[in-house]
Image (cartoon, rainbow, N blue to C red):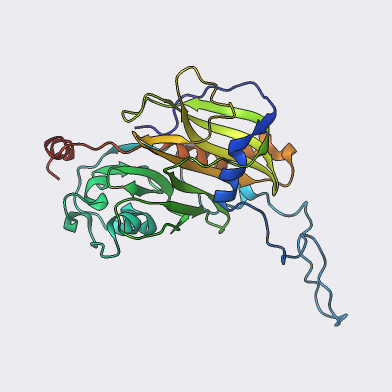
Amino acid sequence: MTARPSRRRTRPRAFCAAAGALLLALAGCSGPGGDAPPTGQAAQSSDAGAPSTAGPTPSETPPAWDDAGDLPSADLESSAYEGGPRAVGEVFHAACVRAVDGDDLPETTDAAEERTAVAIQSTRQLTEGWKACPTQVYESFAVPASFTVENRGQGVGDGAVDRLDIRDGSGEPVGGFVAVNQSPTPESAELVETLEITELEASPVSEEVRYVRTLLVEAGSGPQLLIDQVSAPAGTDPASLEVWDLAAGPDSRALVYASIRLDDAEQGGEAAESELAAVLQAMVGSFEPSVQYPGPILRENRGGS
């Protein structure tokens, strides 16, 4: 499986997108807290001889997409793994697998019970620098190893994730996952420009067409580059107001998203061409909705490992 299929760019458009604000709020990208000093404001000191503690000027502050920590290759691939046992912490983001399997995790993949997320997901191998993040036993997406994942759901080890928040290597919120059983009505946000839409392979759990979108949006907290995976019935405009979440199963929906904060909307094009944006597109695009295989087929697919 290749996480970044061929791209189909759309022409820019501007309209009010109900999807944007909800995703941005869930991503935690509301900007700095009210107590943070303005960037570039000089610190006051009563000691004239003390060295200046002034913060960097706006022109000296690296943009968010250049300060995300170590990033893996955006050419993310998943392939069958046929080697020996691996340490669970090397294969998985711990917060993800704990949310599905519970706190009592084995140290190595071979010590897991057959029908746990550890046992099933460990039959796959990701590109170096990526780790698996299960959201159900048979459902997962890839997250950079340098990113941190926090389980924000109601329970731990109940077989499915409710909500995950993801931060990059510098601690900046960059996305997450939310299970949506009853689609709420998102707040409004202005969609300034549709930068890119990629059609993904069909999902076996839904007849809807899946897409990865890269959108420039203006929300109450400011401009954001929003990257999300959505699905819609064939023939529906993926940039329409109605398209904002993903069919994650016959009776369930999910939000899989990422975002990059911007100082102003004019940075959108530059941010969209950044290494961070490419990595986030790969992360969001790697999500595969759950497929419940029966036992004999599962064992055959696992190759007896």
Q: Is residue 282 left or right of residue 22?
A: left
Where is residue 282? Give x, y as percent.
46, 38
The quadrant of the rendering that contains the N terminus is top left
The vertical placement of 7 against 145, above or below, is: above
Q: Is residue 27 left or right of residue 301?
A: right
* Residue occupying image coordinates x 16% and y 50%: 114
* Residue occupying image coordinates x 30% and y 64%: 103
The vertical placement of 295 against 54, above or below, is: above
Residue 203: quarter of image = top left
* Residue occupying image coordinates x 59% and y 49%: 25
Where is residue 216? Give x, y as percent.
65, 36
Q: Nearer the viewer, residue 168 or 219?
A: 219
Where is residue 78? Give x, y as percent.
33, 38
Q: Residue reaching furthest right?
A: 48
Residue 266: quarter of image = top right
The quadrant of the rendering that contains the C terminus is top left
Q: How many marks?
A: 0
